[in-house]
Amino acid sequence: MIRAIKGTRDILPPASAVWNEVEQAARRVFGGFNYQEIRTPIFEETALFARGVGEETDIVSKEMYTFEDRDGSSLTLRPENTASVIRAFIEHRMDQIPGLKKLFYIGPMFRRERPQKGRYRQFSQIGAEAIGSDFPGVDAEVIEMVAALLDACGVKGSRLLINSVGDPESRARYVAKLKEDLAPHIEALSPDSQRRATTNPLRVLDSKAEQDQPIVEKLPSIHDFLTDACRDHFAAVRRYLDDRGIAYEVTPRLVRGLDYYTHTTFEFLHGALGAQNAICGGGRYNGLAESLGSKVAAPGIGFSIGEDRLVMAVEEARGGIAASALRLFIAPMSDEAFRKGAVLAGAVRAAGASVEVGPPAKLKRLMELANKAGAAYTLLIGEDELAKGQYVLKTMSSGDQSHVNESELVERLRA
Ligand code: HAM
């Protein structure tokens, strides 16, 4: 038997309805903030991610699905979408459109991680990017938009962590200091951190390895290395969050796993998710466009919500997945009744309700089918009903029955 590939999943009904709901909520909430949708390809030149996300990151160095095309070029299934959005921004000269560019996306990403609950090799992100401003008010609005979406989805009790990783100048000084401070402890670090201590020492900060903790705890905070301008930017972001009544925890070790970040970084954590508890990650990336070949500066900030994790949180908040939304089951007791039923179904569907037409069968069998389908109402069509044009409409929850003609039926079931 052929099975789905490890780390990939089929999203089956009724869970798929929850996916549609969160996507609709995202479109509604993002629309309210004047964001428009962008759809970029699922594969890109490998160099885009190597340069955008960073050669030394886990994503690029060990998690990408990279393959050689028939013409020898190296292609990669997108592990994230910010680099692609900026590529499209540059390619289509979107810098020439006046004002802030506010774009959102929903779609699959691919990372070859070790699969576990909430972590997949194909997963979906709902993300947004605001490009063309370094005003800290944009940072606060982007964060507010995530909070608004979580709220719209009924997800409560998430924690917002924020940090500033400064500009390249402050970070270079911090990285140099980290290398210096880590050097005497190399032997005591976990294998991953030993490697990172030289290649990407910022990543040592969010090591989860037990043996690294005593060393990591003594490392200096990036906040001691921020320039005045970086500090001012971060203070303004916090002030604008305060204005919005959004609670946050300043977390100096929140450096995030992608190299393009400058200034603000943030994450939303959610308790119901277990080990993979980051429901959203984001931050500012002021130099990314230039590093991808843009001649003009295009400072930006954005986020990606892990849709798989958002759906889990929604299901948890609801205590399970809602049952079928079927409104009407039509129960025809003969072939002639089935043909009439199909016509009636068309009229009820046109009024916005969902309808299932059963096969011609005996009453007992039809009622079994109606119960299994979870319909709110069942319409019985027998010989008498056909002759009079009056059908029996049964409310399944109470068992109440009434006689309705076609137009009464449509009115009763209008969504
Ligand atoms: P990221 O932190 O790598 O950031 O991913 C964002 C979110 O995607 C995570 O918080 C998580 O919810 C979800 N996610 C990541 N990997 C997996 C996985 N293997 N399985 C399930 N969910 C996963 C980014 O991707 C940046 N592009 C965010 C951003 C946008 N920064 C600026 N703009």
Image (tube, rainbow, N blue to C red):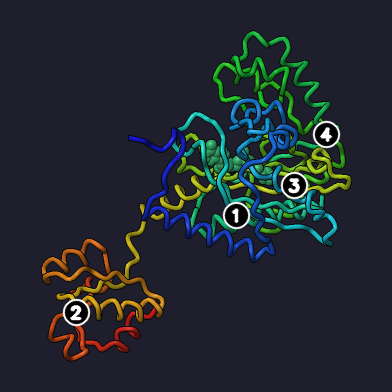
Neighbor class of circle 1 (other Cα within 10 Å; few <14, some 14-19, many 20+) is some
Residue 277, image x, y percentages: 52, 39
The mark nearer the N terminus, 1 or 3, is: 3
> Which one is in front, 203 or 2?
2
Quarter of the image where the N terminus is located: top left
Q: Amino acid at mark 3?
A: Ile
Disc 3 vs disc 4: which is toward the camera? 3
- Whether residues under marks 1 and 2 lie with C-beta atoms below 8 angstroms apart, the answer is no
Residue 194, image x, y percentages: 65, 15
Q: How far apart are labels 2 and 3 at the CA level?
A: 60 Å
> Which one is in front, 219 or 87?
87
The mark nearer the N terminus, 3 or 4, is: 3
Disc 2 vs disc 3: which is toward the camera? 2
Name the residue beneath numbered marker 3: 86
Name the residue beneath numbered marker 1: 147
The mark nearer the N terminus, 4 or 1, is: 1
